[in-house]
Image (cartoon, helix red, strand yellow):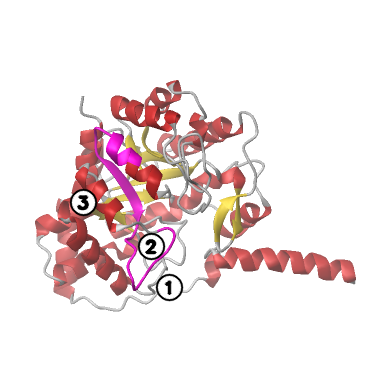
Amino acid sequence: MSDKRVFSGGVLGKISAAYQLGIKPVLFKQPPEVGFSLTDEEHARAVGFMLKHPVIDAHAHPGRTFLRGAKHTGILIKLYTLLGGFYEDRTLADMKAGGMDAVLFSGVADIQLLTIGGGTLKARRGFRQGEAWQSYQTQLANLKALATAGKVALCLGSEDVLQAKAAGQRGAILSMEGADFLEEDLGRVQQVYEDGMRMLTLVHYTDNTLGDTMTNLDGTRGLTGFGNEVVAAMNEVGLMIDMSHASEKTTLAVMARTQKPAVITHTHINSASCSNARFISEEVAHAVAQTGGYIGAWPVGLGMTTLAEFIDRIDFLVETVGEDHVALGSDMDANYKPVMETYRKMPLVIGALFKRGYSEARVAKFMGGNVLKVMDAAQAW
């Protein structure tokens, strides 16, 4: 009897930890409150806009493909896989129904290392020799398999996105959250570009050979010497630089070093009323804008519970850094208590922006124009 109780307690403890991260079986999820409504005319205007303009998500994990075939993960990630499952087809159907044209499909470089601690994800160990590179190869193959199966159109440049939209296909721009797999091999920057990757997030939840994470309070190195070389190499080959999850010291060093736009795909700006370790300072936000990059508005359940409050945050970002420097970064299918949990709500977001007086041109920048602009700038030689 005691053994059974110990086993049950351990499992329940892990389930409790999973719930802290918003990891729940699909059947138990309750949709968040919208907090506003659209008239039929307002909804029709939003749908009409989406037919004319590219609608792009700057950061997401559709279907949680990063979990497929992941080896040597911790108990929490195994539980995440068990409860979360794989839902590429469901999310792709949501993309089509919601009018999404393209998404940056992101892998997770440090998935083998992650566990929960102090209310956030963190590394439970270091990488074994060759593990990070093998995991990258596995995730790359899984992402490309979606295109091989005809489920998405692989987009290597902005023209591919526009062509996919014209053909009625869902576009996939490949990215990796965390560049741990580069290790200290600068030649891999060129290789991952040739592999079809178009964005790298330099760090995730693990301090690596490039820099420090924002949620590791001991991280004081900032951008490393190798990280400095990687930024230059990414500029050279045409890879977009994402500084989500990086410490302020690391991020500001990258913004000073890069010769091309750099971005933070999913975050918000810290304020007196709402602060979090995953948010950034106004100084960092303006530094991103000065490179020509964008901040991805993140519908995370930190300090908000409704879609209406997410529209408020979009407003705040536009007012802070300007309409040329804000995009959508949903973190779909791997977000914490998301207030936008499905792409089927995209017409609501667009309709709400129109309802607040946004012009069509301004909405077009937010919904995809700024992403394509940065993609073009990254690939300009």
Residues marked 2 and 3 touching at CB (< 8 Å) = no
Residues marked 2 and 1 touching at CB (< 8 Å) = yes
Q: Residues within 10 Å of mark 2 (few under 14, many from 20)?
A: some
C-alpha distance separating marks 1 and 3: 29 Å
Of 151 and 321, the residue lying toward us = 321
**Sequence-earlier tag: 2 or 3:** 3
**Sequence-earlier tag: 2 or 1:** 1
Which residue is depicted at the point 24% across and 45% down? Answer: 293
Of 139 and 276, the residue lying toward us = 276
Task: State the extent of the magenta-drawn residues as a range.
Answer: 253-278
Q: Is residue 100 visible?
A: no
Residue 31 placed where, x, y %? 42, 73
What secondary structure is marked by label 3?
A: helix
Q: Is residue 275 visible?
A: yes
Residue furthest to the right: 1
Three-letter residue code for mark 2:
Thr
